Image (cartoon, rainbow, N blue to C red):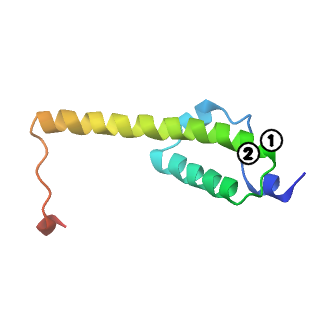
Amino acid sequence: MSAAKNQTPLNSNDSANEIGSMSYEQAFKALEQIVASMESGQLSLEDSLAAYSRGNILLEHCQKSLAAVEQQVKILNERQQLTPFSQGDE
């Protein structure tokens, strides 16, 4: 068993339900970790495939989360419930 396999939680048995319960921030951080581990070149082919598969699920989760927020903002904007941001509001 390689050291990289022990250091990175890339188990293919992680369910989509587990990822689905993550916040956007948690999923994005996990995706960043996967990208870093894959870019390091330390993963075996099998581990790279598992990482890629998990990364796709995480990416889909992030995209769905962003789409939901975008829809909420669109609805609020149509109802004129949003006010323009200005530098003085910080």
Amino acid type at image mark 2 = Ser
Report whether 14 appears left or right of 46.
Answer: left
Q: Quadrant of residue 13?
A: top right
Q: Quadrant of the C terminus?
A: bottom left
Most foreground residue, 23 or 33: 33
1 and 2 marks in contact (CB < 8 Å) = yes
Q: Can you give x and y, in whole percent of width and height, for residue 78 in the image? A: 12, 34
- Report crowding for label 1: few under 14, some 14 to 19, many 20 or more residues within 10 A (C-alpha): few
Dot 2: element: helix
Cα gap from disc 1 to disc 2, whole angstroms: 5 Å
Q: Answer above or below: position of 82 versus 64.
A: below
Q: Can you give x and y, in whole percent of width and height, for residue 53 in the image? A: 66, 36
Q: Which mark is residue 46?
A: 1
Amino acid type at image mark 1 = Glu
Q: Residue at x 73, y 40 (%)?
A: 49
Residue extending furthest toward the right: 1
Q: Which mark is residue 48?
A: 2
Q: Can you give x and y, in whole percent of width and height, for residue 68 in the image? A: 35, 34
Q: Residue at x 53, y 46 (%)?
A: 27
Report whether 67 appears left or right of 20.
Answer: left
Q: Can you give x and y, in whole percent of width and height, for residue 17 in the image? A: 59, 31
Q: Answer above or below: position of 87 versus 47.
A: below
